[in-house]
Each structure stands twice: as structure tokens, then as C-alpha cells.
Image (tube, rainbow, N blue to C red):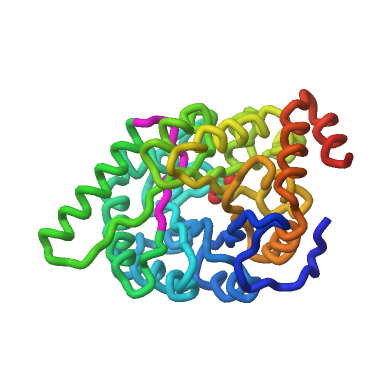
Amino acid sequence: AGGVDAPVVDEAVSTADGKRIEVAANIGGAAELDPAVARGADGIGLFRSEFLFLDRQSPPDEAEQYEAITTALEAFPDDRVVVRTLDIGGDKAVPYLDLPSETNPFLGQRGIRLSLGAHSDLFETQLRALLRACASDHGDDLAVMFPMATQIEEVEAAIERVDSVAADLDSEGIDYTVPELGVMIETPAAAFLADALAERLDFLSIGTNDLTQYVMAVDRENDAVADYHDPLHPAVLRAIDRTVSAAEGRDAWVGMCGEMAGDPDLTELLVGLGLDELSMSAVTVPAVKQQVQQTATDAARELAEEVLACETRAEVEAALDG
Ligand code: PEP
Ligand code: MG
């Protein structure tokens, strides 16, 4: 297994037999860009844009968001930067938005639901900033993804919003480019619909923190049931496999940006499951890159098949140890 003191590898890495795997970083804001560059990340696989909205009295305007996005693009001039649109609700409250309190916030107005509903105004401003940033000097590798999707209709509505923002910018004579568009697979509904999502989008990014929460019916923040929040549960692994398999033969790449992606002990399994990109907290980038280089895709595929046949967590553990 890879140690935390693995050497930094600045260039892109491939498996021992030559399959390129992108190893990117998750960030919440500009302060995390330098550490991500220093650890050799191949770009940003998850920019949690909601952090721009927290700990303040009013939302950031279009100019401030444009600045934050272009700063990330400049830090990684040759690599992809994936910005997730606002993912508030659930565990992330924003006081000035005055959202009604909910009995089950994780099952309530979260992510894309708010962007298409009560806070379509914020969504529009964010999309304007993103489309403009995509036309900036280093903007051609910008990608945008939507959180918490459960319906094809909402993804189509989000794409329509992108198109209507593009039309607005066009009529205003403002430079813009439509970025690569993707969706997070973090609900069972999205995993079951991954084929239909992959038809409509450029990429899928599996958010195992929420996917595990929703597959396992367990609050990701409740310590009393933390054992159930386990991405190695066979049902979660099968949801991941289903997602990756659904995208095969379609034109969409598949990444993973949940905590699971940053565990170097799981890199071989994730390569075997067929992921193209892994995005994680910057500290684990060197160890995961080292693991990718030591992985042979045939052996990884065999490991994945063995693990996918398991019916219990104990069997999964035994297969991974074996
Ligand atoms: C996830 O759910 O796995 C994810 C990456 O998003 P967040 O942790 O921000 O909800
Ligand atoms: Mg999530």
C-alpha cells in the first residue's frame, strides 16, 4: 500500500501497462490551489463552489465568482478544472438564503433541486461566471457538473439553463464558451440512470460520500451509525460498477470524487472498476499516483470482478487482502 510519504509526481501517470488515470484534487477555494499544485495533482476534479457562499452575509456576485474560477484555471493551465455548481442544503446551510428548516435536510432541497427551484437566480449568476471563465485564457479545460441529480428532467433543465445563459451572453456581446458538462452520481437514482445520463453529458463523477449515504440509508454525519457509511459495502460497490459500465461505449468519461478515491489501498480496485479519473484531497495525490503506476489493469480487473461477486463486507475485505 502507498505511504503518505510517496514522492510527488508532477506529470500525468499511467498504469504499468499504459492506461492513463487522471489523479486530480478536490478543493473548496483558492487557498487549496497551491497545495494541490505542490502535490502534483492533474488538475481539479471537484471545486466545491458552495464554499464561496459560506461564512458571509450575501452571495458572491458574478465578478467574484469569475475571479475564483479563473484563478483555479490559471493554477492548472494545462489540466482540467471541474467546478461543481452550488451544492447547498443538506449539511451545508447558508444563513442569508433563508432556506426553510427541514426535518430531513439530506432528503430535501439540496444541490440541483435548489438551483432549478428556489435559487435559480444564484444558478444563473454562477452559470454566467462559468461560461465567461470558459472563454478566458486557460478556460478551455473547464468542466462543470451538477450535484444531487435524481431525474433526467432536471439534468435536461440544467442543460437548458446553460443554453439560455449562453444565448443571453451572446445577445449582450459578451465572450463565452460552453464548458464540458457532467453530473455527480451520488444518489441511487442517478446510478440506476447512469446510461441515460451518459447519453446526455460529457462525464459522470461518482460522489461516494453521498452515494454511500443514500444507498445505505445512513446519515453521513451520525457517528452512532458510522459503520454503515461504508463505500466497501457490496451494494455501494455494485452501484459504482453499474455507473462505470453504463458509460462504457458512450462518449462520457467517469471519475470519482468522494473520499474513497483518495485511499491508496483502493486504487487497484478503482482502476479495475474502470474509472478514468480519481479526485481527492491533495495530500493523498502522490500516494495514489504511485499506486496507479504499480497497477496492472488485467490484475485490477480480476480483483474488481472478485470483489463485485462478494455478498458481504467481510468477503470484500478478504478479497482485497488476498
Ligand atoms: C460526495 O458526496 O462524495 C462528494 C464528493 O460531495 P460532498 O462530499 O461535497 O457532498
Ligand atoms: Mg456530495
Residue 140 appears in the figure: yes
The quadrant of the picture occupied by the C terminus is top right
Q: Residue furthest front?
A: 17
Residue 221 in the image, given as x and y percentages of width and height: 65, 42
Q: Residue at x 72, y 30 (%)?
A: 308
Residue drawn at x 54%, y 72% as measured from the top left: 33
**Quadrant housing residue 13:** bottom right
Residue 215, image x, y percentages: 61, 29
Q: Report the number of discs.
A: 0
Quarter of the figure with residue 8 = bottom right
Q: Is residue 146 magenta?
A: yes
Quadrant showing the N terminus = bottom right
Q: Nearer the viewer, residue 184 or 244?
A: 244
The residue at the point 52 percent across, 62 percent down is: 44
- 138 vs 300, nearest the viewer: 300
**Residue at point 60% right, 70% down?**
36
Quarter of image, ligand 2: top right
- Relative to 203, say whether 23 is above or below: below
The residue closer to the viewer here, 120 or 149, is 149
Locate residue 58, reporting x and y percent.
35, 61
Report the span colored magenta.
143-152
Left/right of residue 101 with respect to residue 62 in the rendered view: right
Is 251 magenta? The answer is no
Relative to 128, is 93 above or below?
Answer: above
Q: Is residue 11 above or below residue 28?
A: below
x and y percent of residue 190 in the render? Answer: 48, 32
User: For this view, does 280 lie left or right of residue 172?
Assistant: right
